[in-house]
Amino acid sequence: VVGSKQTDEERDIESSLSYMGEVLHRIEEARDALSASSETYLKKLDEFRKTTIGKAKNKKKEFDKTTQRYCTMIENNMKIPTKRSDLFQEADANLQVQTKKFREETLDYVFLLQQVQERKKFDFVETV
């Protein structure tokens, strides 16, 4: 049969193409695995950003407002003359209430930040 024998070049080309096909197949498998893991992590990161980080940002805004009110109240309290004891006592009582609110807000904010850190460790660091 004429043409049924392969030359050395044809065998080399066939071998090279076969090897190249195997390499491309492995590359595609690796790409699919990376794509799947990327989607998994990106989905988790996006969910984490929207829920947990979003709550922390809102809590920070509340904390900043409370801090601003507290600092303003302290400044106003310092401007009150001590000779007017009735006004001073009322301002002092208001300051104590605001101090309590400020401390509660501070503790809530710090607690939320700690929760975010723990969740970040649990959701991302330990899974890697």
Image (cartoon, rainbow, N blue to C red):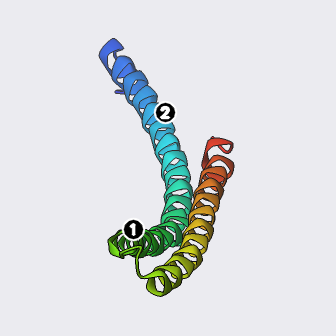
Judge by depth and name the residue closer to the eye, 72 or 51: 72
* Label 2 secondary element: helix
Q: How many residues crowd mark 1 within 10 Å: few (<14), some (14–19), many (20+)?
A: some
**Mark 2, residues whose alpha carbon is within 10 Å: few (<14), some, or many (≥20)?**
few
Rendered location of residue 104, percent (x, y): 62, 69
Is 11 placed above or below 96 here?
Answer: above
Q: Residue at position x 62%, y 62% from top?
A: 107
Question: Pointer 2: what residue?
Answer: 22
> Residue 89 at what x, y percent from top left?
53, 81
Residue farthest along the top direction in this orientation: 8
Q: Amino acid at mark 2?
A: Glu
Residue in the picture at 45% in, 38% down: 27
Residue at numbered disc 1:
71
Could you tell me the amino acid type at mark 1?
Cys
Q: Are marks 2 and 1 in contact (CB under 8 Å)?
A: no
At x 44%, y 30%, the residue is 18
Label 1: state its secondary structure.
helix
Counting residues from the start of the chain, the first of labels 2 and 1 encountered is 2
In the rendering, which numbered label is found on residue 103?
none
